[in-house]
Amino acid sequence: MLRVDQVVSGYGPIDVLKHVTISLDKGEIVAVLGANGAGKTTLLRTITGLIRVRKGSVTFGDKVLNGLSPAEVVKCGISHVPEGRHIFPDLTVEDNLLLAAYAMPRSQQKGRLDAMYAMFTILAERRKQAGGTLSGGEQQMLALARGLMPNPRLMLLDEPSLGLAPKTIGTVFDTLAHLRESGVSILLVEQNAKRSLELADRAYILVTGQVALEGTARELSGNEMVKQLYLGGTR
Amino acid sequence: MSIDIFLNLTVRGLTTGAVYALVGMGIVLILQTTNVMNFAQGDTGMFITYLAFFMITTAKVPYSLVLILAIAAGAVVGLLVERFMMRSVRSRSHLSLIMLTLGLSLLFQGLAAFLFKTEPRLFPPLVSGDPIKLGPIILGRQDIVVLLAAIATFGILYLFLYRTKQGAAARSISQDEYAARVLGIPTPSIYMLVWAIGSALAGLAALLIVPRFSLEPSFMGLIQVKAFTAIVLGGMNSVFGAAVGGLIIGVVENLVAYQFPAIKDSFMLIVIVIVLLVMPQGLFGKRQQRRF
């Protein structure tokens, strides 16, 4: 469904991604692991159109995404939940959600809003509250709900567990598992390699902007190097 | 100072303040959404007022139509400025954006001086007739129009910001531009819209106040400085603050000018300094607070 083919992209004079090729099939959860600076976030930003593709191509279904604006990419059915949540602090929970479905007609927005409140009951309770007053975990739920608002076929998730309490991390991953059931594909960037590999079908490991390793989650979990470097394994 | 004089000074100050509020609200709208301090706000209005002047005097277009055309012309100027000046520079350098607006201000002044000459011209008021008496208060008809226009503008801006999805998008951009782009909000078109509204306000404001002065290329200069004072007092990031700040500045200035005419204009600059020192967030501003 998603194909990132030999993509080069970066900031200013620097190429961060150097000929990265990854793919994702419908219904899959694919994890992208790697150290800080490996290019994980850059990969997501390139897919969403926040950064230009310099070489190579990004295709979704039979649509080429190269050169599209983030607004157009969202219309194609891809949503992006950024690292650090980026909730609008002074807007209400409801406005935060509605803005995530900006291009959607009002009648459909209402239905999506109800669906989100059904899935995240805490957000229904807080709907008139300013986004900045929510706790970290609640903000992450809001960020996830914003990602789901436009009814995407593919969600890009950047570090959804970063800075959360262990219990809340559990809730986040449970939600992701639940989303898979409902048919949303997920491209997941995570520091928490252990949990990601438990959840994901397949994974890629990025090292300095290149795919160093790829395989099913099971294969990678059993790989000695992965154990050493990302799973905190002991000899 | 007798109570009658005090009342008259206050009410007349409010009408002057309404002018500062009109200019200030446009500046805050653009500042908040696009993060650019538009130093050309006043002179955009000045230039449009010249266009309006020739529509009225030479082309004999009816005044009400001129008012609508001036607002439309302001919107078009705003669109063009955003599309062809701001957009290409935005991603490169923020400081350059602000310098661009300064340059734009000089461009409008130079163009006006070149095309229309610098000699002052008398601009007819929208409504003429004898001043209206309300008890001891005497008010010019145009002053009442200005006051009503400021109130209406505030209402329209409020509805735009809090009742439309484009307004919500503008507020979201002011809080977190990156997040707005990530969510797929078409930020370029929101920027264009906001520049159009802000510049339309510039045209409206200048047209309404020019009868009180005379039309010349520099007539908006001091008014823009007062509008900045109003914004600082009101708290930089709130349209409401700009409106109230403008009214307060207008009244205080008028009272000070009555007692100490010599320091009328410099007094407001002192106010800016004091406000920035004592309460930099202004009367209605919010301190930025974010929680991740």
Image: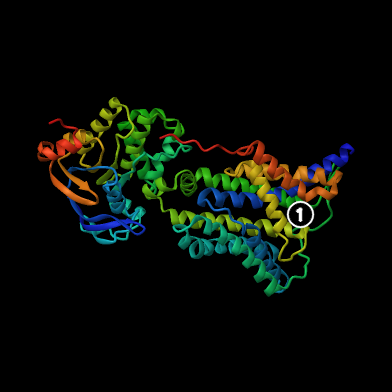
Q: Position of residue B111 (x, y in %)?
A: 65, 71
- Is residue B61 depicted above or below A216 in this figure? below
Q: Nearer the viewer, residue B140 or B253?
A: B253
Q: Nearer the viewer, residue A134 or A218?
A: A218
Q: Amino acid at mark 1?
A: Gln
Answer with left or right where residue B64 lies relative to residue A203.
right
Q: Position of residue B76 (x, y in %)?
A: 55, 64
Q: Nearer the viewer, residue B162 or A197?
A: A197
Answer with left or right where residue A219 lies relative to residue A76.
left
Chain letter of the residue beneath label 1 in the structure image: B
| Residue with the mark numbered 1 | B142
Give the quarter of the image for residue B218.
bottom right
Farthest-out residue, right: B2
Query: Could you tell me which quadrant the C terminus of chain A lies in?
Result: top left
Give the quarter of the image for residue B255.
top right
Residue drawn at the location 56% of the way across and 57% of the way down: B98
Instruction: Tell me if residue A181 can be seen.
Output: no
Instruction: Tell me if residue B127 can be seen.
Output: yes
Mark 1 Cα-neighbour bin, 10 Å: few <14, some 14–19, many ≥20 = many
Farthest-out residue, top: A167
Q: Quick one: SS at disc 1? A: helix
Give the quarter of the image for residue A10.
bottom left
